[in-house]
Image: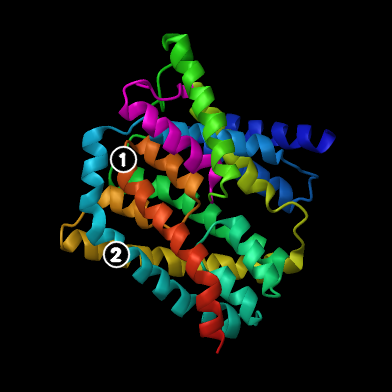
Amino acid sequence: MIRIAITHAIAAVGVLVFHLLSLPLPWLLGPITACLIAALWGAPMRSIPILNNAMRSILGVAVGATFTTALVISMAGYWTTLLLVPVMIFFIGLIGVPYFQRLWGFDFATSYYSAMPGGLQDMLLFGEEAGGDVRALSLIHATRVMVIVVALPFILSGYWNVDLSNPPGVPAATLPPSQLVLMVVAGLAGWQIAKAVGLFGASILGPMILAGLLALTGVLYHRPPAEAIWAAQFFIGMTVGTKYAGVTGYEVRRDVAAALGFCVILLLLSAVFVKIINVFELAPPMETLLAFAPGGQAEMTVLALIAGADMAFVIAHHVLRIVTVIIGAPIAARLFNR
């Protein structure tokens, strides 16, 4: 309990500092930065996994509540850019595996699952079963998510002048109590149902599907309040930062340094695909960047919500990325190894 209390206090200080300095997304980037610095200084930190998943369900409800009949119909028009998602994953693996294996000396299993831009838990599970270094995988994927989540707000505000300071929703006091109850039910029930049927990313996708059904039938017509979205950002940011707890100097010099170099590769690859899509005018530039940036699903959802992007477009591409990696990674790893 002491470690949990220390972690929350550190994350709160990060929010305060970001607010005082008028930096973007204080509720997300503040906890990430503060917890990362504290971890590097050896502070004892710990998060609460079940609470973190509950916060993710808020994002699922927020996305699902934006669904309309017109929006769902428009998703059929995404096929041209959706086809590029597996192509991008192929190039990531083609460049990433030799990068980790030959340049940094990781074994094949660690190299392969470090390169794959899937969910953290899935890549750790697959990597461990294949005999990879779980600690290295954890640090590499945490660094991938952190760098991309930190870099994108500055790109969005600096290049497209996106205002990231607007509240992500209306105050809770202005929403009908019945809508708040529906959101809670959609979040908890959707999460548990998705978990029971074994759906990946159950804490986000389950609430998103259930809230989407409620929105399409006209029962749910409000998004979660601003306070709930801020809380989700806080806990997600804190979770990313605490992944570095207990990191050693050797791990920083090898695992984290390797991950930082790979992040540069990922950002360049993403820029290439975004440019191709923009040249052929297949999708809006900002939505394309958010859809093809290989960050965490929850973190990209937060950024899309704050930026006011087309949620259906962004989420559809990230879901396909995760599905492609989860289904294809074990099969491709065997073929790649041969």
In the image, residue 90 above or below residue 98: above
Q: Position of residue 307 (x, y in %)?
A: 35, 38
Residue at left 52%, top 34%? Answer: 190
Mark 1 surroundings: few (<14), some (14-19) or many (≥20) residues within 10 A: some
Q: Position of residue 266 (x, y in %)?
A: 44, 66
185 above or below 69? above
Q: What numbered label is drawn on residue 83?
A: 2
Start-end of magenta stretch: 200-226
Q: Residue at x 32, y 36 (%)?
A: 308
Extreme residue in the front direction: 197
Distance from the alpha carbon under mark 2 to that under mark 1? 20 Å
Color scheme of the displayed model: rainbow
Contact (Cβ within 8 Å) of mark 2 with mark 1:
no
Q: Quadrant of residue 113?
A: bottom right
Please give the residue where the numbered disc 1 appears in the rendered image. 309
**In this view of the protein, which residue sits in the foreground, 87 or 79?**
79
How busy is the neighbourhood of tag 2: few (under 14 within 10 Å), some, or many (20 plus)? few
Mark 2 / mark 1, whichever is N-terminal: 2
What's the residue at 57%, 75% (across, down)? 112
Q: Residue at x 65, y 32 (%)?
A: 13
Res. 230 visible in picture: yes
Q: Quadrant of the C terminus?
A: bottom right
From this viewpoint, is residue 19 visible?
no
